Image (tube, rainbow, N blue to C red):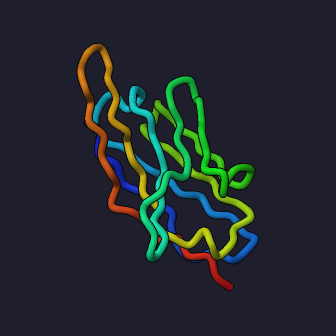
Amino acid sequence: QVEVVEYGGGLAQPGGSLRLSCVASGSMFSIYPMAWYRQRLGNERELVAVIREGEKTNYADSVKGRFTISRDNANNTMDLHMSSLTPEVTAIYYCKSEPVYYRGTLHRGSWGPGTQVTVSS
């Protein structure tokens, strides 16, 4: 199992950009699908983007074309580049290593503690 921690949150201007990073500790990072979730005030946690084996990615409709997820398996990191920011992006963003079966064994995922992103002028 890998443990994950997010970095890079903070305050950004509308129309600006921000990059979040997720750093994983532990082994076999590359086998895990990795994802970003967010939880806006008063709302449930929702999937923002996920990156799977072979660099296959999926995005929530609300962020398509504005957010880009990427990973670096050699350095156990995953990034979320966010652009054309709007106040609706304001949320706590969570990194998650998703559970995965690998060679007949379930490898459990884990959540990071979250990082606050605020978009405001």
- What quarter of the picture does the C terminus occupy? bottom right
Residue 109: horizontal and vertical position, in percent?
30, 40
Farthest residue in the front direction?
43
| Residue sticking out furthest to the bottom | 121
- Above or below for 77 versus 18: above
Residue 7 visible in the shown view: no
Please tell me which residue lies in front, 116 or 63.
Answer: 63
Relative height, residue 13 to residue 54 (above, below):
below
Quarter of the image where one finds residue 45: bottom left
Q: Residue at x 50, y 67 (%)?
A: 9
Q: Is residue 80 left or right of residue 75?
A: right
Q: Residue 55 falls in which quadrant of the image?
A: top right
Number of numbered discs = 0
Quadrant housing the N terminus:
top left
Where does residue 50 sit, x and y in percent of width and height?
52, 41
Residue located at (65% from left, 47% from top) = 68
User: For the point 53% across and 57% down, which residue is it?
Assistant: 20
For the question of whether residue 73 can be seen, the reply is yes
Instruction: Residue at 62% x, 76% y: name it.
Output: 119
Spot the residue most to the top.
Answer: 103
Q: Is residue 110 above or below residue 31?
A: below
- Above-or-below relation of 75 to 40: above
x then y, percent, for residue 86: 69, 72
- Residue 79 on image: x %, y %: 54, 48
Q: Nearer the viewer, residue 119 or 22?
A: 119
Q: Is residue 58 left or right of residue 116?
A: right
- In this view, the residue in front, 29 or 87, is 87
Q: Nearer the viewer, residue 36 or 24?
A: 36
